[in-house]
Image: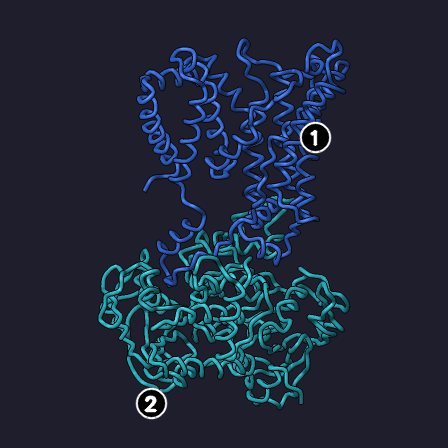
Amino acid sequence: MLRATAITRRFGRTLALDGVDFEARPGEIHALVGENGAGKTTLMNVLDGWVAPDSGEASLDGKPLQPGSPRAALAAGIATVHQSPMLFERMTWEENLALGGFDQGAGGLDLADVAARARALAAKLGFDLPSAAITVENRSVAERVRLEVLRALSFNPRVLILDEPTSVLAPSELTAFLDLLRKLRGEGRIVVLITHKLAEAIAVADRITVLRRGRVVARTTPAETSEEKLAALMIGELVTQPNAAAMRPHPGAIVLQVDNLTLADRIGRKILDQLSFQVAAGEVVGIAGVDGNGQTELVELLADVRQPSAGRITAIGAIAVIPQNRDLDGLILDMRLWENLLLARPIRDQATSHGWLNTSRAIDLCRELIARFRIRAPGPETLAGALSGGNRQRLEVARAIASHPRVIVAHNICRGLDLAATAEVHRTILDFAAAGGAVLLISSDLDELLAICGRLLIISGGKIRETSPGDRDPERLGLLMAGARD
Amino acid sequence: MLSAIAKPFAALALAAALISIVLAALGASPLGVFAALAEGAFGSWYEFSETLVKSTPLIFTGLAVSIAFSGALWNIGADGQLTIGAIAAGAVGPHLGDFPHLIAIVIILAAGALGGAVWGAIAGWLRARRDVNEVISTIMLNFVAVQALSWMVHGPLMEPSGAYPTSSPIAPAAQLDFYFAPSRLNFGMLLAVVLAAACYLLLFNTSAGFELRAMGRNRRAATFFGVRIPALTVWVMALTGAMAGLGGAVQISAISHRLYEKLSPGWGFEAIAVALVARLNPLAIIPAALLFGALDNGSQAMQRTQGISPELVQVIQGLVILIILAFDTPAWSGLREQIFGASGDGANPVPPVAEMPDA
């Protein structure tokens, strides 16, 4: 039995956990749900020793856990998969896994042995692993999460805590992943799943604990509750999801045209293969796909940080890009909010005259955006890293809109965001489209795309295809994303 | 919580305490030694002016290092860039006799800056186009520069009599004046202070400086938002090379008036410590360089009156740097402080994803 009693933890002026009691039993999947900033991750960090609580204690099978010691937690049998993958970018995946329990540690380090053990476990779980000696830096987010799950399981842990692991998985991978969790439960382990995908919590969990603003507001089971009830518990009020049906189809002029766009890697393999599509003013077009099928490269081409091997991108007006990895590509976490606005070239140019930066102008703009997009931050001088995930994303969207583009290209922008933040980001995007902007939304979350996109394209293996407007069957679309042909 | 200003002084006090123990163990009187050190550095107007003179090359090289480091370009080559700048100044200096004083000064300083810029740009180009780590290339270029100087004063630039391994003296027109003779205080110090202010403005008040800082903090994000990293790399290395080279030219023009072997006692390396103590802030480079200049200058008096070897000053310097850095917080723990101290809903502690430098 994993038990936390009366845990309180304060970060500066924020009370992250306020007397939280939590318990998870052997042989159960326990879902921990709540909004961004509700305290889920902090609770997990208390359990796995990353954060020492101000008061309260935790125990596993009656034995108290040493607070604030990840090493002790791991030794006690608690393994975790963090929300932002904690991998060594410039090391190979084998080396990353060698830090887990695969390495037998009998003197030297045998990477081949680590790889063999990892492959054996991965095969059992239905994961694919990259070919030998590939560094992590260029792998997709989904692959990174898989590596982290493998590393956690390599310790043969008694307790496995996963922080939003499914937000990066494709529908086809999700079923397998949930089966994996059930398998682990079957072995008598304790599985704690942190999520805000409520359908998932209801589908897989035995019990559900709901956190709101650092307090437990409900303990329930899937049989006793529903998505609507959970959502209401989490945020206190129901937020209605925007619906694509409510959007008027008013195709305006074509503002983004992509013709035969092709990108080959160094050895001539085609990462993108003759992509052609267009986006009209007022349209929200979705590109659905499993991570690693060329989306990242497409975004880089659209952002003009990479040159295509062949083909052309034509845009009327500026393109604002919101990259998928907000902490690595989108923001500079140890710079201030107003400095992060300046990262966008149109805003930087606007605040610059003859090379001189008008910083007070950027600060004013930042203050205005904080108010307009309800970014919860003390002020423009706050460091971007001090914001929660949802507010970081609001900042990115605000920055994109403030650079007055004709086209917004957004890649997995709602990954890791809760219901309220997702709805707000979607509303902002839809407002932008309604005002005549064009939006290209690239996502691995089919539900998200079906909810707000007028047209839907599928990318798979670097090729793109359009789906017919009537075809909205998630299962069939999921198969197409996985590479199936008609 | 110690303020940013109090920290260096607390570090100094701790260093003094440690060094006292060392001195006592050596049988010297700590108070007497420190008094001699202070006397030698600040005891009289002349001594103080010498401290300023000794700090000047450290300001130039310290700025070069801090600007490059702000962009996460680990320029270890300020010494070589200064040396090449000095060679350029020493080469043109003797031929400027027919120019008006002001023009001659401009030419000799420009020559130094240009020489340093070329030396820095080589490392920048290697990094940008051939992906050669600038730490390695700048260290190698330091070796080349030092030997180039040695060859120059034994060969092409050797003074006509051939008796000494030095170059011919530069023309009087190209010499910076001493304002307050007999003190050697000159225009170079003023230039260094103006350059520090200019660097501060560049870094925090221009678009180019913003791009430089963005590149330093997060190269990936900077790339994504259209900062041309390769071009910026070459420019920054050239610019910082020019600053170090200017420092070399000032040294030739104002102080030594000719080239000789081992011109730099290691200013370019001491500059790294200066820049780190100043936390890369161009304005803070001035007091940081003064601190090191004072230690250099005071050590001579210490040797004279207390019989303590000047090497001990290097021990003091080493301790000061270590302790200041230990008092300092690395970039990401400052970030963590912000998160934990912030209000709003930022309760998710961010794992330290801060990228390690490319070095």
Read off the residue under disc 1: B115
Q: Residues within 10 Å of mark 2 (few under 14, many from 20)?
A: few
Q: Position of residue A205 (x, y in %)?
A: 37, 83
Instruction: Compare residues A79 and A24 and report the one nearer the observer.
Output: A79
* Colour chain B appears in: blue
Instruction: Compare residues A43 and A313 and report the one nearer the observer.
Output: A43
Whether residues under marks 1 and 2 lie with C-beta atoms below 8 angstroms apart, the answer is no
**In the displayed structure image, the side of residue B300 where residue B186 appears, left or right:** right
**Chain that appears cyan:** A
Q: Residue at x 74, y 9 (%)?
A: B161
Q: Quadrant of the N terminus of chain A?
A: bottom left
**In the displayed structure image, the side of residue B349 where residue B170 appears, left or right:** right
Read off the residue under disc 2: A223
Q: Position of residue B99 (x, y in %)?
A: 75, 16
Count the marks: how many?
2
The three-letter code of the residue at mark 2 reads Ala
Q: Position of residue B264 (x, y in %)?
A: 59, 24
**In the displayed structure image, the side of residue B147 where residue A41 appears, left or right:** left
